[in-house]
Structures are given as C-alpha cells and as structure tokens.
Amino acid sequence: MTSTNVAAAIRGAMLTAEPAAKAMATRAVRRDWAAGRLAFVFDQAMPDEPARPARPELLPPNAMPKRGRGGSERGRLALLHALAHIEFVAIDLALDAAGRFGEQRGPEFVTDWLDVAADEAMHFSLLARRLRTLGSDYGALPAHDGLWDAARETAHDAAARLAVVPMVLEARGLDVTPVTIERFTAAGDLRSARILERILSDEIRHVRYGTTHFLKLCDERGESPPVLWKTLVARHFRGAVKPPFNDSARRAAGLSYELMTGVV
C-alpha cells in the first residue's frame, strides 16, 4: 500500500532491511515529498530500531578487528566496507530525524533531512558498487554496532540530535575524509578517491543543515549556541571532540571555532 503521509513513508523506509531496497525506498520518499505527494502528517511513531539485514555481522566497537590504515588492498577493502556501513546507518539517522522531529520543527526541517537521507542512500550505493567491483560486497565483513547509539541517546530532543549527529559525528567526517582520500590516491585507487571526494562535498552541506537548524533552535529557546552545544555534547556523546580539525570544511559548514567556543 502506498503511503500518503510523510511519517508513514519514512517509517516504511526505516523498516526496510535489505540495503539496496532501503536506499531505493529512501530516494522514493524524498521524491514523493518534493513532488507534494506526501501530506505533512505525523500519525505514526518512528521505530526505536531500524530494520537491519542479516549481513554484516554487527559487533560491539571494542570487538571489531583492526583494519589497518588502508595501505594494502585488503586494508582498503576493509576501509571501504566500514565507510559503506557508516553511510548505511546514516540513511536511518537522517530518516529518523525527519520523522521524529519534523512535526515540531516544520516542513523545511523535513525537506533538509530527507535530502540528507537521499544523499546517504546514494553514498551507500556508490560504496557498495565499488566493493562489488573490487570483488567484495557489503556484508562480507563485520561492522560496528555502536552507530545507532546516537539516535537512542538523543531521541527525546531535536537540539541534542543536531548537536551530536551532524555537529559532532558528521563533522568528524569532514576532518578525517581528506586523509582517507590521500591514502586511496597514493595507492592508485582514484575511483574510490573520487567517491570520497563526492561524499565530502555533500557532508559539508549536511553539517551546514545541522548547524543552521541548531542555531534556529537556540534562538527560539534564548540559549547561547556554544553553551548549549557543549552541554548537550557532554551529556549525550560518549567520546571526545578533539583535533585535528578540517577548519576550512567546518567553516564552509558554518561550524566555526568561534561558534562552538564563543571565543572571537
């Protein structure tokens, strides 16, 4: 049965387990929303956990095998697989943001996070295709089971979700992806490097969406952005926000040092 409202459509995509089908369903939700075929109605709750395929095997972070730095062919395959898994989980993180907080935050918020979800679906598809070209596939290796923790931890508060997911997790991608691109380039794998360049470009926009909506929330609440961001990250992020930072990419995303620290 075809969904007629945006919450039902998002929930349906999140409960699609097979990776290629999830990517296709996510793109369809974005197209239908953009075309005005989905009503701004939120009559269904988002699932606590999205559907997951039988493969890859999901392990706790501390049980993941070391994959090296991507210098060998095997190491590069492991790195591509890890990146594909990050993008796969990111599809559901973006869908959940749109479906969980969209009613309170409005249609523009839904549009932005469905844009992000569709981008993540495209990124996953590019990486999964690259793995197949190299003789592997998504699911061939175990994957990190801690990526959905950020969604669980911030399910109660849109500001917390924005502070942790785009403004910490995706921002970290801005910091580390250029080095990964250099490694693939040095190994002669220019096709993989170009995929990562595309992902980096899109992720700058994703972080900008997060920053923009976070600042809007701060303004509505009468909160200082640096103070609220630090408070929410300390409360809800199980890790450290530490350098090195990709300052140019962060500034392009609106996530400047001044904004995050309050120091001009």
Image (spheres, rainbow, N blue to C red):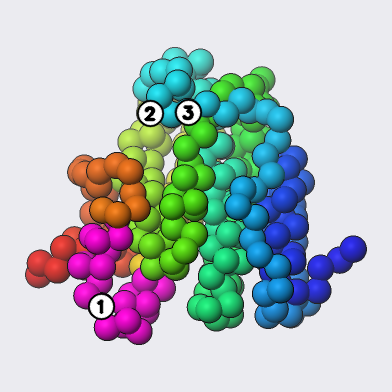
Tag 1 or tag 2, which sits nearer the N-term?
2
Left or right of 161, for residue 246: left
Mark 3 is surrounded, within 10 Å at the Cα level, by few (under 14), some (14 to 19) or many (20 or more) other residues, namely few
Please tell me whether the stretch drawn in magenta is mainly helix, strand or loop: helix
Give the vertical position of 63 relative to 115 (above or below): above
Residue at 47 percent of width and 28 percent of height = 60
Where does label 1 land, which residue? Answer: 223
Relative depth, front residue between 222 and 48 = 48
> Could you tell me if residue 15 is visible in this image?
yes
Q: Is residue 221 magenta?
A: yes
Of badges 2 and 3, the one in the foreground is: 3
Question: On residue 231, which mark appears?
Answer: none
Which residue sits furthest left? 264
* Quadrant containing the N terminus in the rendered view: bottom right
The kind of residue tagged 3 is: Pro
Question: Considering the numbered disc 1 on the image, is that residue within a helix, a strand or a loop?
Answer: loop
Place residue 132 in its image quadrant: top right
Q: CA distance from mark 3 to mark 1?
A: 36 Å
What whole-number distance in Å separates the C-alpha atoms at marks 2 and 1? 41 Å
- The stretch in magenta equals 213-233
Count neighbours of disc 1 (C-alpha within 10 A) and say few if under 14, some if 14 to 19, many if 20 or more: few
Residue type (three-letter) at the residue carrying disc 1: Glu
Give the residue at x 68% y 80%: 40
C-alpha separation, residue under disc 2 versus residue under disc 3: 27 Å
Q: Residue 169: x percent and y percent?
A: 38, 49
How far from the left and from the top, in percent, is residue 142?
A: 56, 23
Say left or right for 231 vs 93: left
Residue at which label 3 appears? 60
> Quarter of the image containing the C terminus?
bottom left
Q: Earlier in the sequence, mark 3 or mark 1?
A: 3
Q: Where does label 2 land, which residue?
A: 183
